[in-house]
Amino acid sequence: MADLTTDFLGIKTPNPFWLASAPPTDKEYNVRRAFEAGWGGVVWKTLGSEGPPVVNVNGPRYGAIYGADRRLLGLNNIELITDRDLFMNLEEIKRVKADYPDRAIIASIMVPCEEEAWKAILPLVEDCGADGIELNFGCPHGMAERGMGSAVGQVPEYIEMVTRWCKQYYSKPVIVKLTPNITDIRLPAAAAKRGGADAVSLINTINSITSVNLDSMAPEPTIDGKGTHGGYCGPAVKPIAMSMVSEIARNPETQGLPMSGIGGVTTWRDAAEYMALGCGNVQVCTAVMTYGFKIVEEMISGLSQWMDEKGHTNTSDFVGMAVPNVTDWQYLNLNYVAKAVISQDDCIKCGRCYAACEDTSHQAIAMSEDRTFSVINEECVACNLCVDVCPVENCITMEVMKPGEVDPRTGKVVSGDYANWTTHPNNPGAVAAE
Amino acid sequence: MATPLTPGIAVGRLPADEIAENFKDLHAPYAPHEAAVAADRCYFCYDAPCVTACPTSIDIPLFIRQISTGTPDSAAETIFDQNILGGMCARVCPTEDLCEQACVRETAEGKPVEIGRLQRYATDTAMAKNSHPFERAAPTGKRVAVLGAGPAGLACAHRLAMLGHDVSLLDAKGKAGGLNEFGIAAYKSTDDFAAKEVAWLMGIGGITFHHGQILGESFQLDELVANHDAVFMGVGLGGVNALGVPGDDQECVFDAVRFIAHLRQASDLTELPVGRNVVVIGGGMTAVDAAVQSKLLGALNVTIAYRRGRDAMGASTYEQDLAASKGVNLMFNVQPKALHADDENYVEFIELEYTHDDGTGLKGTGETVKLEADQVFRAIGQTLTTDGGLALDGRKIAVSETGKTSNAKVWAGGDCAAGGDDLTVTAVAEGRDAAMDIHATLMGGAS
């Protein structure tokens, strides 16, 4: 069985599965349960400045989006940072860390964007024995209204400044958690790096209203007839997060900057995908809030099995392996020609491919009287929509045409040469192909 | 107190609570979450095979999607648009042979979307509100007589009333519903559903019900034709085929349809007599309904004796399995040869002869088997009792695709009309389509 021991910023944990800073890591009781269940590390629920803690609403904090059978696909929250006393949290961190020296505890911190505030809290955190800190520049709700959270994360200069303070007043690894509520994720990541961050973690939650109650005409979750936008997370946000991860991974300015992947990680496969895009580990929240801590057992066994199958002996073996294959559209090979092929043995004749193609795409699927569905190669542009809507996995596949064959749609011979938009004759800015 | 072992035909073989348990709803209705989960399984197929397989062409993917989006009343309207008896059909349709057999998830997993139960969820939800979903069109001044208040007649009457015609609905029996009320196993139509559905259907207005009206006795077809702009015949099949073997006239030989009718109308099932050893001759739904209900009443041994093989049986595989699961013994390739009675006129034995079909027709092999029997049910088909002088096709009234008969002012549909497969849902379709044709004819449009 593959060894899942993971070294992230010099912090060794028995596996790359950490819990994200969130309700599951708000206190000693939960974190002990998480470690007993097998989680490699936790990022403790965000600590605020010394003094009276923040307060939370006393009504619903979460809203959800469901798929079939009420399977939770997306979760939204309006909970703030920890509403417990700073020193109580620090004592608990110290106690738990002492009992679980092989697990990581990272302290998430959010204090006002003033040097004094950071200078005050960092020595206290240093003392509690946490393995590092994560700067919460991400929460888009509540705290942002007070100039913290995503209000900082949306200004690269602030990120750089605060990160610099942290590196100055704190000796252990500093991870900067990024907000996705920004146009270009590369800018805050680069700012964090300039400020000396050891790593970035992403994404924090996305601004969201999950639903509107059509009886009360108020957003949900609703507090006394009113609602506010919250932070969206869960499986639904994974594609958004992975794209941002890939942008940072391949940006020359931030290339090689360690990343901790967050956003909808639910299974071992999600984790492996984030890691393939360059994350040294992953952080999980919504999945445990939906199913409890036990899911880590599946994540551990699944990643081990996959690593064994692929011959990976260490989790670092495959970190970033997919990054070189993430490119810009303009570099995609336009001489690559594929056609959809429908397996008649597997087809259950639902006709969804036909409806999708006929109504919304290229009219490239024929339907016979006896409901046999077949691809019209003269029309098929290989868009993949039929594959995506087919309820039977692998019933429809995309078959690549071989060089020398004639594409019945264009009448052109398929070339084996690579050619992209930058050299295409239709591109006004094309450069001559050499 | 009788028990299943009590000889002869006896009442109260089982305690009242056990009988009540036996006759409760065969499929409990879906709770809202169950319906949502079941609805989620529908793929919303293009030109869906389930719709093609439905004799009334209900837009099944649409109504299931309407359930899944929390609008069961809209779902019900989609159903009622095509099939005003969608509530009963949801209970009695052999969905395993129709929509659910055609479901692509049956192909994919052997586990179709449970269309029948979803239909029941939608129709029950809507009907519980006790409001009628349709409004009548402006009165046309046309008067139509509908003979027979079974599924065909009710569907026809409703559609005609909706289109603005005045409908006289006549039935020989004391109440409307036809086989929905007097046939069909009790566990498929619990809580007096058939009568409630008729009352709800009548909510359209414009339908006047006249009971106790027997064609050929109370009135003649000619009189109706003379007094109305059009007539629809949906009289069903009132006669029962005889066994045609010695002993058929014994007192302990019953018509299965009458037994079921008695059972459906009984106020106390513990007062309904049933034999210790029951043999049902036949292979259709009526045979299964009679056999299963005999067993549920407490008969010790119940056998369905069918003259052909399992494949030829009119009852679906699902119905056969249901019978078997209730403890009914299924015998194939046997036909009745004789009934042997004792001195007190009780049937003691039924003698069955094995059959064989070598391609030239079914023949007895000469070899026989005797079964103990103190009650025998005939369930070998029903016959038209009165044709009103209309041309026949075989033993039923000849009709065009839209139900036209040999009389230009008379249409027919349901079991009394030729063609179709004698299902409730088919009768509904025929009644509905005849109504549309009557409407087109009366309003001057060609059809």
Image (cartoon, coloured by chain):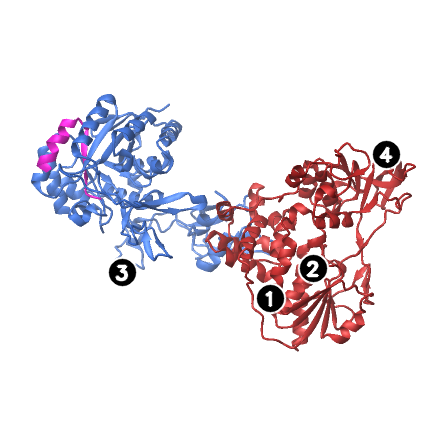
Q: Quadrant of residue B295?
A: top right
Which color is chain B depicted in?
red
Residue A321 in view: no
Q: Are marks 2 and 3 on the same chain?
A: no
Residue topped by disc 1: B204
Counting residues from the start of the chain, the first of labels 2 and 4 encountered is 2
Residue located beneath label 2 in the image: B176
Circles 1 and 2 on the same subunit: yes
Q: Give how far apart the Cα atoms at labels 3 and 1 are.
A: 69 Å
Among the two numbered marks 1 and 2 on one chain, the one whose residue lies closer to the N terminus: 2
Label 4 to label 1: alpha-carbon separation: 54 Å
Q: Are marks 2 and 4 on the same chain?
A: yes
Residue that label 3 marks: A428
Residue B315 placement (x, y as % from top left): 72, 45
Q: Position of residue B352 (x, y in %)?
A: 85, 38
Magenta span covers which residues?
A118-138
Mark 2, chain letter? B
Residue B43 to residue B157: above or below = above
Residue B5 among those drawn in magenta: no
